[in-house]
Amino acid sequence: MSDSIAGRAASEASVSRPTRSISGVRPGRIERPASTAEVAEIMRAAASAGESVVPTGAGTKLRWGNPPTSADILLDLSALDQVIEHASGDLIATVGAGTPLARLNEQVATADQRLALDETLAGATVGGTLAANTSGPLRMLAGTMRDLLIGVTMVRADGVVAKAGGKVVKNVAGYDVGKLLVGSMGTLAVVTEATFRLHPVPQSRRWVGVAARDAAHAAELTQAVLHSQTVPSGLEVDATADGLQVDVLVEGRPEGVAGRTAVLKQLLPGAEISDRPPAGWGRYPWGDTSDRHVRIKVTFRLSGLADVIEAAGGLGLRGSAGVGVAYVAVPADRVITEIRGVLARLRETTGRHGGSTVVLDAPQAIKEQLDLWGPVPALELMRRVKDEFDPDHRLSPGRFVGGI
């Protein structure tokens, strides 16, 4: 460790003893770099010593995926928390990976702009959101992290700093590398900075919500909205034991929002209009970060919505009916055979509708008894990519699909 890192004041110490584990695996130590250069220095030293490294930000998704096979260093990137550049005229912003999404949006909001990406977990950082590829209702308007990311600065497993993409929307040099890092669970490189395309903050927002009689009716309502000219920013379904709700978000100029809201009111008999989001909007159905649920993500073609709701039963499904991404919460106190049965039912249904079912997180004792990922057709290709980026398999080893 260099003097530049080791010599920091105790209140900003870069190295400490771990007080938390990663799905039961306790790291050897925690390193807290404050710059890309310091990340590179740590990674070079780790490569020389053959040490494994697990990057983290706020830790909101640190337990997602498999437990790492080893974790010599927990690389805490929370000090990389600055908005480095905001070019409001170009609608772009470059930020450190440890920057909370909420803080980024607070800063760019001063220019009436936003990163059109929902904070699905309170305190989530840019880097963690990128690594897990999380998104919420606004994915219907602007897509996911892959669509909004235009450039990254990353540190390879050997400590070499590299850049991909650029700082203008039209610059696509190396853009696919940035896309590759999204959703890779920190297994390919350590992202230290990211550049995003921003959107203007809408002048007006309205939510239109309506109760559905059953899964088929929810699918019918969803299709009515999708085939209308209302251009929703979000189209969500919330299925619980208490009933089904379909909610639509419309944004834009006040006169346009008023007109589209009126159309939706006619399309959705009994609908109610609000200028506030419904309860649970943009949040997962498990509603907490405790061990009380097995947390499942499902994807599917839009035509499969009714079947997926039926497959989830009354467990609690919430997500983007207009995109085909949703989440299911299974109480962790169910017997393991029942949990496996739910998982098998969801996998059969989503597979039949061109999607997949993945266990994001669960209590460790349950996680060990489940196949978290299910069938992955591109697994061999993903392994080859891992070998190219991290030939010694020291970055978040084992956390991703297939033990990558």
Image: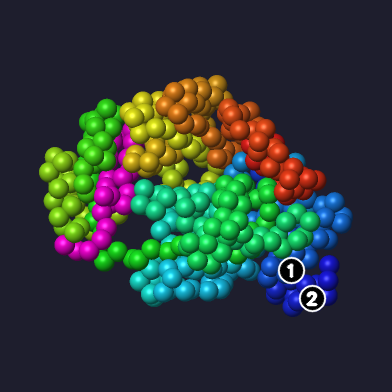
Range of the magenta residues? 231-255
Q: Which quadrant holds the N terminus?
A: bottom right
Q: Secondary structure at mark 1?
A: helix
Q: Is residue 250 within the magenta segment? A: yes
User: Would residue 70 be seen by someone viewing this image from the given angle?
Assistant: no
Estimate how packed mark 2 is, as few (under 14), some (14 to 19) or many (20 or more) residues with alpha carbons within 10 Å. Answer: few
- Location of residue 113 with respect to 237 vertically, above or below: below
Q: Residue at x 56, y 64 (%)?
A: 166
Residue for point 48% across, 61% down: 170
Q: Position of residue 220 (x, y in %)?
A: 24, 32
Mark 2 in CB contact with mark 1 (< 8 angstroms) = yes
Residue in view at x 19 percent, y 63 percent: 254
Q: Which residue is mark 2?
A: 4
Q: Position of residue 325 (x, y in %)?
A: 42, 39
Say above or below: 219 vs 29. above
218 or 331: nearer the eye? Answer: 218
Q: Position of residue 365 (x, y in %)?
A: 64, 34
Q: Is residue 131 magenta?
A: no
Q: Earlier in the sequence, mark 2 or mark 1?
A: 2
- The residue singled out by tag 1 in the image is 38
User: Which amino acid type corresponds to the residue marked 1 in the rendered image?
Assistant: Glu
